[in-house]
Image (cartoon, rainbow, N blue to C red):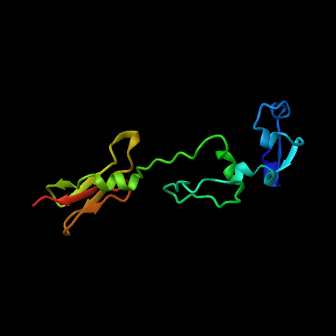
Amino acid sequence: MASLVLRGAVRLSSGARLGLLRPSCAARDTVLPLRGCSRALTSGATEKVTHTGQAYEEKDYRKVRFIDAKKEVNPHFAIELVAEEPPIEVAGSTACCDGGGGALGHPKVYINVDPEGPHPCGYCGLRFIKKH
């Protein structure tokens, strides 16, 4: 079925032939060109962009997945949530970060906090500063 979509046609199921699907798309033959179902290729002007920058053009066939459901995007990006976390003060000149420990963390790294200012962990983005 995916190969038919890539070639520009969609094969309808028996439910579509019985009229159980949207009549604007299902009222034709059993094989439809994608341009025949205009509802699948249009989107509102309020299409949300994901944290990876994913936004489809007006004629992109991948917009078919949003026919019956709207695109759900989490407005709280991880990089913004980490930036809200205050820097962790360290008494010595070296901070140790393992991302929370155990299987949920990341490999243990040691961060030099001698230079002035916050120093982020390369894995999780937590910031460390030297306590004065």
Q: Quadrant of residue 68?
A: top right
Position of 8 relative to 29 (above/below): below
Please name the residue shown 70% across and 48% down the image: 64
Position of 75 relative to 119 (above/below): above
Question: Toward the viewer: 78 or 27?
Answer: 27
Residue 127 relative to residue 49: left or right: left
Locate residue 126, reporting x and y percent. 30, 54
Question: Toward the viewer: 93 or 19?
Answer: 19
Count the marks: how many?
Answer: 0
Residue 21 relative to residue 85: left or right: right
Question: Toward the viewer: 60 or 98?
Answer: 60
Q: Dividing the image into 4 quarters, which one contains the C terminus?
A: bottom left
Please name the residue shown 40% across and 52% down the image: 78
Locate residue 45, reporting x and y percent. 57, 57
Residue 116 relative to residue 2: left or right: left
Q: Dividing the image into 4 quarters, which one contains the N terminus?
A: top right
Question: Toward the viewer: 42 or 73?
Answer: 42
